[in-house]
Amino acid sequence: MAGIHTAVRSRRKTSTAAVIGAATALLALSGCGGGGTAANGAYGFPEAKQEASSTITVWVDADRQAAAKAFQRANPNTKIKVVTYDGSANGSNSFRTKMQLFDRAGSGWPDVVFSSQNNDAAWASQKSGGKQAFAAVLDKGLVPKDTLGNFTEGSLNPCTVDGHVYCLRNDLAQAVLWYNKSLLDKFGYAVPTTWEEYQALGEKVAKEHPGYIIGTAGDAWTPEVFMWGSKCQANDVPGPKSLTVKTDSTECKRAASLLDALRDNGTVPTVSVFTPEFLKKYSGKVLMMPGPAWYAGAIFNNPQSLNVPAGQLGVAAPLPWKGESGPVTGNVGGGTWFVSSHSKNLKAAEKFVQFVTTADEYQVDVAPGYPAYAPAAQKWVAKQEASKYYATSLQPVVTAASQVWDGWGYPMFSQEAIWAKTITPGITGGKSIVDLLPTWQTAIENQAKVNGYKVN
């Protein structure tokens, strides 16, 4: 469940391995940042000398400690060392920064890394400063084809660069419309079926039931819920080093205008869902909330958060804009697992990553988020519905998994970090999001250029 607390926050071709001469081998060795490597590994990247019995170091965020524990229970003979870090939460970029330090040192890389972000494959798949890429290629024999083929269609897009897969998704984070069925029934409100109806309901709630809310706009992933779901072309990646940014479009302006109106009347406050303030002010007063699949376990069915009682929480499909053929949705996290190309125990590292993304012992029995691995997702949904916690079927969550709009891409940098730095201070200070759209545009363009993108 990538976004929980920590997320709270692609794509082209690799040359086929070929027999090369000793001179080329020496060059490859010098570019690896470490000795004892094979210039032409079996899996499409230079490999370190393998030590089958060595301990693997696994980096996880706090919430993925459960994944490591599940693996240890199922594989007691595989030695792992678990290190906890922030998971690059909210676009902190800590994963990339730390790997750059290890590149310079020529040692120290962990064998496996979890990230809460979906933009990491874009840099982790590339050489940096002459050093080999951090991420191991997974689809050239390291991970079985049958395993890769069972991930939900499109779920590995953030992991795919130049046509090859560099990471595995932990869970999917498609946004849907969560709502409290008991409160809606009590107030006599219908579940909205368009964004226009959603805004109209917010205006009605502000007048008839002040203090109740229908969403939030205080987290770094706000644009991934509202802007992405409105087809705002602020983050389109048409090519490996190309970015299209167009925040002055109708699609961007309509989402910004909606947020302005609902923020002003108090029904979509600019407060983070993971703050004491949110719990104090809005426990028992959340009528509905557009947000990712993982909100169910992270916020609603969580004793440490809203703790909504069983039988009240319902879920509806992502909202379309009036006149459009159907809804699209954004993607808020859905963490990623990487195997290091520097690992001295690739077999154990791959075993770990495959387990935590596919095994029932974690994805079905423990993980609170919607699994990216399709067979596990089916079992997860069945288990959730059998619990009788939800007031409705979870089918909208399943359907939304294939409705993520592909016009919002996965560049090397984090949109969450840009929004948090340039937009959040403005909107919490009362500025209009519509008026801030040019500021957002400039910030995205500047960050893209720093990372070597040609901006369209």
Image: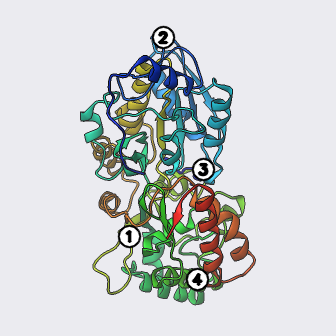
Query: Which residue is identified by label 3?
Result: 5
Secondary structure found at label 1: loop
Q: In this rendering, which labeled residue sits more in front, label 2 or label 4? A: 2
Dot 2 amino acid type: Glu
**Would you place residue 21 above or below residue 310 in this image?**
above
Give the camera-side residue of 280 and 141.
141
Q: Label 1 belongs to which residue?
A: 318
The residue where tag 2 is placed is: 51
**Rendering coords of residue 195 (x, y %):** 43, 81
**Closer to us: 430 or 284:** 430
Proximity of marks 1 and 4: CB atoms separated by less than 8 Å: no
User: Does residue 289 show up?
Assistant: no
Q: Amino acid at mark 4?
A: Leu
- Residue wearing tag 4: 262
Task: Give the alpha-carbon distance from disc 1 to disc 4, as whole Å.
Answer: 18 Å
N-term mark: 1 or 4: 4
The residue sitting at 62% across, 79% down in the picture is 438
Which badge, 2 or 3, is on the more N-terminal residue? 3
User: Residue 266 location, x and y as percent?
Assistant: 64, 81
Distance Cα–Cα, label 2 vs label 4 = 58 Å
Packing grade of label 3 (10 A; few <14, some 14-19, many >=20) is many
| Callouts 3 and 1 close, C-beta under 8 Å | no
SS for callout 4:
helix
Which is more toward the observer, 153 or 22? 22
Residue type pointed to by label 3: His
For the residue marked with disc 1, what is the amino acid?
Pro
